[in-house]
Amino acid sequence: MEEISSSGYKEYVAGCLAGVAAVASGHPFDTVKVMLQKHNAEAHMIQYRNGLHCTARILKTEGIKGLYRGATSSFVGMAVEGSLFFGIYSQTKMYLQGGVQSGEPRPQVIIPSAAYSGAIISFVLGPTELIKCRMQIQGTDSLVPKSSRYSSPLDCALKTVKTEGVKGIFRGGCTTLLRESIGNAVFMSVYEYVRHQMHSNIKVSSSNYSNLVDIGIGIAAGGLGGVGFWLTVLPLDVAKTLIQTNPDKNCPRNPFRVLSSVYQRAGFKGCYAGLGPTISRAFPANAATIVAWELALKMLSIRRD
């Protein structure tokens, strides 16, 4: 295959489209994941048997729109996040390679590039995910009084700043940084390795099928990368959700302390609350992300190795 070329803004445009694709395909699963994390990892909350039970409850009480609660902030956040992540990742990777193209995946290049990009985007994701999570938990079976509920993402942001100050909107930021740095290092490592191996072993007999093969490889590599991401960092995501949705502004912010409390109360299962919908979402959402990114790069005439 062809090598990556330096492309300036075009990598960021492609990443923006990839972020939008991720939300469009994965937000309903994310809503169920957050609901399970909030209800099944905390005491005194209505417990769901599994992801299907939670989904059925949401559809029964709110309809399909309930699954897209909080999607507005997600579309904005993921568009910016996708743009920054893929743009910074590509440019950092080129820098670490010293401008010399490499056919085989190099962990010493991929891991720091992805971890650095993940750390940068956490500053965008932290506030948008805080708003998203607070919007998501105030629907079906919520214990939040109706008088205290947010009418929109903007209302949530304004009230959070009013009651907790500007720093309140960044609550859970350290946990988000850990999740994104570690998770994206795993994600891009799996993606780059699987992509390279599949391209090395699949011989296309006709150029007419090359685009279909590239899409198929993108689906497999992106999907597996997404599964690897979430299997690695889901406990950190559980801690992040609990930190960001706790009504007590003085609640513990140390993710490991939060997870210790969850483990004592709900065991290992509690630390992986929402695993079912998370994995169900991880493959299609990340496959869509990678395919959208790669197709956008092709349309913008940016070469990929």
Image: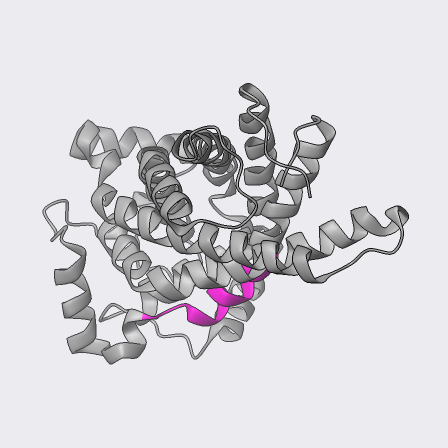
User: Left or right of 288: which side holds 46?
Assistant: left
Residue 63 seen in the current view: no
The answer to whether residue 197 is magenta is no
Instruction: Give the tally of numbered discs.
Output: 0
User: Left or right of 216: which side holds 285?
Assistant: left
The residue depicted at 31 percent of the width and 78 percent of the height is 269
Compared with 37, 178 (above or below) is above
Residue 270 seen in the current view: yes
Q: Main secondary structure of the magenta part?
A: helix
Q: How is the image coloured?
A: one colour
Residue sitting nearer the eye, 74 or 67: 74
Q: Residue furthest top?
A: 8
Q: Where in the figure is residue 17, as x and y percent of width and height? A: 61, 34
Kindly indicate the quadrant of the structure image that contains residue 231.
Answer: bottom left
Which quadrant would the N terminus be assigned to in this image?
A: top right
Give the magenta-colored segment's residue range: 272-284
Q: Where in the figure is residue 150, as x and y percent of width and height? A: 37, 40
The residue depicted at 60 percent of the width and 60 percent of the height is 197
Compared with 22, 49 (above or below) is below
Residue sitting nearer the eye, 30 or 103: 103
The answer to whether residue 277 is magenta is yes
Q: Where in the figure is residue 49, as x and y percent of width and height? A: 43, 79
Which quadrant would the C terminus be assigned to in this image?
A: top right
Q: Where in the figure is residue 35, as x and y percent of width and height? A: 40, 61
Residue sitting nearer the eye, 276 or 139: 276
Kindly indicate the quadrant of the structure image that contains residue 280.
Answer: bottom right
The residue depicted at 77 percent of the width and 54 percent of the height is 213
User: Left or right of 15: which side holds 235?
Assistant: left
